[in-house]
Amino acid sequence: MASERAYLDWNASAPLRAEARAAMIAAMDLVGNPSSIHAEGRAAKALLERARGQVAAAFGAEGADVIFTSGATEAAALALAGRGYHGAPVEHDAVRAWIEESLAVGRDGRVAVAAPARSVLQAANSETGILQDLPEGLALVDATQAFGKVPFAFNWSGAEMAIISAHKIGGPKGVGALVVKRGTEIAARIRGGGQEMGRRAGTENLVGIAGFGAAAEAAMRDLDAGLWDEVREKRDFLEERLASGANMIIFVGKESARLPNTSCFAEPGWKNETQVMQMDLAGFAISAGSACSSGKTRRSPVLLAMGYGEEVARGAVRVSIGPETTMDEIERFADAWAAACEKHRARAA
């Protein structure tokens, strides 16, 4: 095992931000329940609402309702269960579980939406990074990957609802939110108390929510400061380096608008789980697609929906980086992957 590891799997989970960690530690010292009316309860409630305001401001959702959940998966279930909305096979599994997969996907990864009010669409794909044009009046946008990496404002998106997650922007795992236009009807799936405006019962995860709020605020500062433009330059350098040593490599979505940090590429015939394991042993954390689907032999449903064949769908891996990723890490990874690829080709010859 390499002694110096490089984490290149930011789309699965971004490293915890210092601001989020500090906010969580401070929240641990609050003893009150946010639903209690005594002084301790009011202090907890104030922290809860401060975090709600931070998330709303960062997401461009002032005036909308931010409903805290255990993550984007629960947020998707809360928004979509029983509604029969339409979507595409490129959506995340948490969304695909609740939709009719009837929307067509082009080779460029773009989805054609005919009836926005009955449809769900991701803002950015977690595997390829491909960005979608959001039609006005969309029922729900999955902004989990786009939030914090590219400019996005819920109030300008034209969508009725959106889902987001804390750990994709450097917050803690296990907390997310469903954001809805004020007045939108949402039936609670977890019933009991009247927490979260009666839409999600249960004592709120105050520590996680405090971390979410702090991470959202910090993420917007990074975006405004142009840090993700620098990330894009590093991603582009990585692809140039990989292409120079592997003439058979296929970069998925390179001609489309993409997230600045995501590169999905394939060496046809070289299984993605093998690549992930070999790179792990070499000291690099990458993935074979969505973290919820990786760790198993898989054909990417995203690439299949885009019209790629079996060899590409089974040979695609994802590298996703962030502002903390260094050029040294990128160069070392490119060299390690190219060396492993050369050995694979020699064995296959």
Image (spheres, rainbow, N blue to C red):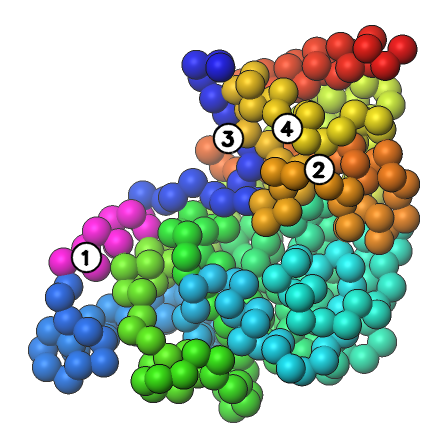
Above or below, 191 against 19 in this view is: below
Q: Position of residue 14 (x, y in %)?
A: 47, 43
Which circle's residue, 1 or 2, is located before the other in the chain? Answer: 1
Q: Say what amino acid the circle numbered 3 marks.
A: Tyr
Q: Counting residues from the N terminus, which is met first, the one under dot 3 or under dot 2?
A: 3
Number of residues whose C-alpha sits closer than 10 Å to that of mark 2, classed few (under 14), some (14–19) or many (20 or more): few
In the picture of the structure, the residue carrying the numbered disc 1 is 28
Tell us which disc is closer to us: 4 or 3: 4
Query: What secondary structure is found at the residue carrying circle 3?
Result: strand
Q: Are marks 3 and 2 in contact (CB under 8 Å)?
A: no
- Of pointers 4 and 3, the one earlier in the residue sequence: 3
Kindly identify the amino acid type of the residue bearing the numbered disc 1: Met
Using the numbered discs, state the Cα–Cα distance from disc 3 to disc 1 in whole angstroms. Answer: 28 Å
Q: Quadrant of residue 200?
A: bottom left
Q: What residue sits right under mark 3 in the picture? A: 7
Give the percent coordinates (x, y) of residue 89.
78, 59
Q: Is residue 165 above or below residue 190?
A: above
Q: Secondary structure at mark 2?
A: loop
Region in magenta? 19-29
Which mark is nearer the camera, 3 or 2? Answer: 2
Q: Which residue is mark 4?
A: 276
Image quadrant holding the C terminus, namely top right
- Residue 22 magenta-highlighted: yes
Q: Alpha-carbon neighbours of circle 1 within 10 Å: few (<14), some, or many (≥20)?
A: few
Q: Residue at x 61, y 78 (%)?
A: 81
Q: Which residue is mark 2?
A: 297
Q: Looking at the picture, which amino acid does disc 2 mark?
A: Thr
For residue 29, which quarter of the picture? bottom left
- Above/below status of 258 relative to 163: above
Tell me, yes or no, whether the highlighted magenta stretch contains residue 24: yes
Q: How far apart are the alpha carbons under marks 4 and 2? A: 11 Å
